[in-house]
Amino acid sequence: MTIKVGDRLPQATFRVMTADGPAAKTTDELFKGKKVVLFAVPGAFTPTCHRNHLPGYVGKAAEIKAKGVDAIMVTSTNDVFVMDAWAKASGGAGVIEFLADGNADFAKAIGLSMDGSGFGLGTRSQRYSMVVEDGVVTALNVEEAAGKAEASGAEAMLGQL
């Protein structure tokens, strides 16, 4: 079943890079008591994700946070090392929190995984954005086509906040 507005995020564990190396962070640690913009991409460094979706959020981060958002986070079904390299290469490090969902556990738990095996990608996350307030989804935007970042892009998100 796909998550919807009004639903609480399921318990899940992401991997994040810290100064001491990879660490686990739960949905409670990331979302409890905060207003968070979370967006998901099918893959770090992939064309739409790297050239369009992530740069929009990096460029609009200050405007988004000025609307009362505590944190902006991106998740992808890549491992923590790829996500860390992407954070550094994209200019997103320190601006956006990069959450690795390497086994697609979170994507599956919220009903937004997709089968990319026809392209050699395995199980991936669909492209979406959401606003999460204290663990509850208050806005959700799922892209109909994986190669577009319009409904889930930073501009659209700014209009919802």
Image (cartoon, rainbow, N blue to C red):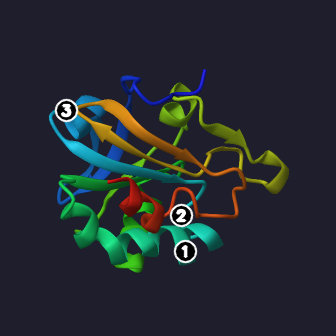
Distance from disc 2 to disc 3, alpha carbons, whole Å, reads 26 Å
The front one of 110 and 86 is 110
Q: Amino acid at mark 3?
A: Lys
Instruction: State the mark number for residue 156.
Output: none
Q: Which residue is mark 3?
A: 32
- Tag 1 or tag 3, which sits nearer the N-term? 3
- Identity of the residue furthest to the left in this view: 33
Instruction: Give x and y (percent) for residue 2.
Output: 58, 27
Q: Quadrant of the N terminus?
A: top right
Q: Nearer the viewer, mark 1 or mark 2?
A: 1
Question: Helix, strand or loop at disc 3?
Answer: loop
Q: Residues within 10 Å of mark 3 (few under 14, many from 20)?
A: some
Q: Which residue is mark 2?
A: 44
Instruction: Give x and y (percent) for residue 102.
Output: 51, 44
Q: Which residue is mark 1?
A: 52
Q: Is residue 68 left or right of residue 90?
A: left
Q: Is residue 3 left or right of residue 7?
A: right
Q: Residue at x 58, y 59 (%)?
A: 43
Question: Helix, strand or loop at disc 2?
Answer: loop
Instruction: Give x and y (percent) for residue 70.
Output: 18, 52
Q: Quadrant of the C terminus?
A: bottom left
